[in-house]
Image (cartoon, rainbow, N blue to C red):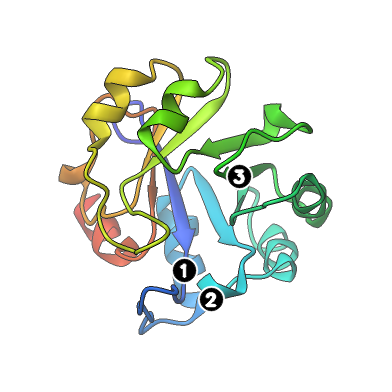
Amino acid sequence: MYHGIKIIAEVKTQSPFGFRSAHTWDELFAVANRVGDMISIHTDPRWGGSFDLIKKACTMTNKPILAKGIHASDGDIERALAAGADWVLVVGRVPSTHIEKCLIEPNTIQELADLPAQVRAVWNSRDLQTGKRKKESFAEARSIFSGWMCQASLIGSIDDVHSEADAVLVGERLKEFAVSCK
């Protein structure tokens, strides 16, 4: 926790945008387990994830686990929860099941504005179609959505954390971020 902001530490070994970690999944998990209040585990193979890694993570920590992926169907949410996840990230839609256990990541600022006020939102600074930075900042997103909201992507140090975030999800630069927390 940093000034009341929950740290969600992501175990990410690769991305479809060319990122490849120099560290193993186990090495990154150890950092995530040390730094995070919650640990994010990818379920999507494009990010080096799987549902089996959720099961593995549950045997390695008592911290809450976020299943991170697109989770395009409600069946994917069921599968993540059955694997042991406490929370499930859902991208680009509001699910019809287990919404109380979901973090909703809209693709656009308009999707964010249309979210029900009671959901937990994630504003990802990275466009998942291109891998590039979105034009709208977290501050702009916060001005549109006043509910619980997590800041995600392009975070390399504690200095990148927006003071109005309820949580921050740190991935590719987790090791660098961990050093800044000392």
In the rendered structure, which amino acid carries the disc numbered 1?
Answer: Lys
Q: Which residue lies furthest to the left in this view?
A: 159
Give the labeled residue for mark 2: 26
Q: Is mark 1 on a helix, strand or loop?
A: loop
Give the labeled residue for mark 1: 12
Question: Which tag is nearer the camera, tag 3 or tag 2?
Answer: 3
Give the labeled residue for mark 3: 90
Question: Which tag is nearer the camera, tag 2 or tag 1?
Answer: 1
Q: Where is residue 171 in the image (x, y as percent from the top left)?
A: 39, 60
Which quadrant, please, contains the N terminus?
top left
Q: Residue 34 carries which label?
A: none
Relative height, residue 39 to residue 12 (above, below)? above
Q: Nearer the viewer, residue 30 or 77?
A: 77
Q: Which of pointers 3 and 2 lies earlier in the amino acid sequence?
A: 2
Q: Where is residue 181 in the image (x, y as percent from the top left)?
A: 25, 49
> Is 123 on the left-hand or right-hand side of 47?
left
Q: Which of pointers 2 and 1 lies earlier in the amino acid sequence?
A: 1
Question: Which tag is nearer the camera, tag 1 or tag 3?
Answer: 3
Instruction: Sort mark 3 into few (<14), some (14-19) or many (20+) by Cα contacts within 10 Å.
Output: many
Instruction: Sort mark 1 into few (<14), some (14-19) or many (20+) by Cα contacts within 10 Å.
Output: many
In the rendered structure, which amino acid carries the disc numbered 2?
Answer: Asp
Q: Which of 138 and 7 is in front in this view?
A: 138
| Residue 182 appears in view | no
Q: Which of pointers 1 and 3 lies earlier in the amino acid sequence?
A: 1
